[in-house]
Amino acid sequence: MSYQLALERRKALKSKLRNRERVFGGWVSYPDPGITETFAKAGFDFIAIDMEHTTISLAEARQIITSCHAEGVTCLPRPVSHNNDIVKPLLEAGADGMIIQMVETAEEVRNLINITKFPPNGRRSYGVNRAHGYGFDFDAYITDWNDSSSLILQVESIKGVENIDSLLAFDEVDGVMVGPYDISGSLGVPGQTNHPLVREAARKVVEACARAGKSVCTQIANVTPEAVEDAFAQGYTYVILGSDLFVLTNWARQTGAVVNQFRKA
């Protein structure tokens, strides 16, 4: 994919997020780039790489980013930490932005802006790698990056919920992703993502994002038209639809049920 096309797609995603338009993301948890290429055929606005809860390495993530771009889809990794040692190589590999897990304070947001944005917005250092077209697109990349890349914060603890207004105060933040599993744990009801306390916490984030004009997302494990409509009805502006892990798990359960049925016959 040419630099200009990559830039256009990156800017298109950011514009949709900024305007709170409906955006649809995919999610990959397995490192095989063939899975990413298959998912990319679905027409997602972006594909996220889960590096927090998987064993996907930096080298494997680079292959996934390349696969996304080969199919004309933007790619937003979710690194395992807020550490520049992890974030910087993903950016240099050509990621179009970041989804950052477990953001709880304004100080953390400021640090994330520092490591993901070039001066004057942040302190990202200058180098040459795949993101810069190995030097061919260096000037254009460093000029365009701050205004075209996307920064999404995951709010997934009651502390993050309580601090949501301060997290959204930064212009560089394009959107939020609610993490109900970790919110449930922080509220003492782990795994109960539909518990009233969890739903109330999520509602507070959704309403804060509406006030701040920021996009807000949830992930739908079992993708149906009804589930997507329900998410939009709750005030979410974009959704991440399932994941390769969920797809395979659901297939294994269904197939296992068939196997057991015929074993008992």
Image (tube, grey):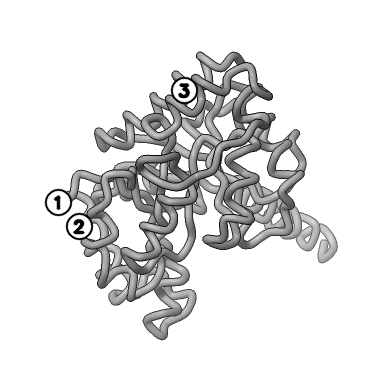
Quadrant location, the N terminus: top right
Residue with the mark numbered 1: 211
**Horizontal placement of 107 versus 260: left or right?**
left
Q: Position of residue 244 (x, y in %)?
A: 64, 46
2 and 1 marks in contact (CB < 8 Å): yes
Q: Amino acid at mark 1?
A: Arg
Label 2 sits on a secondary structure element that is helix
Residue with the mark numbered 2: 208
**Horizontal placement of 95 versus 32: left or right?**
left
User: Cα distance, mark 3 to mark 1?
Assistant: 27 Å
User: Cα distance, mark 2 to mark 3?
Assistant: 28 Å
> In the displayed structure, would residue 223 be above or below residue 194?
above
Q: Residue at x 29, y 69 (%)?
A: 161
Residue 38 visible at all = no
Q: Position of residue 260 (x, y in %)?
A: 78, 63
Q: Which mark is residue 9?
A: 3
> In the displayed structure, would residue 62 be above or below residue 42?
below
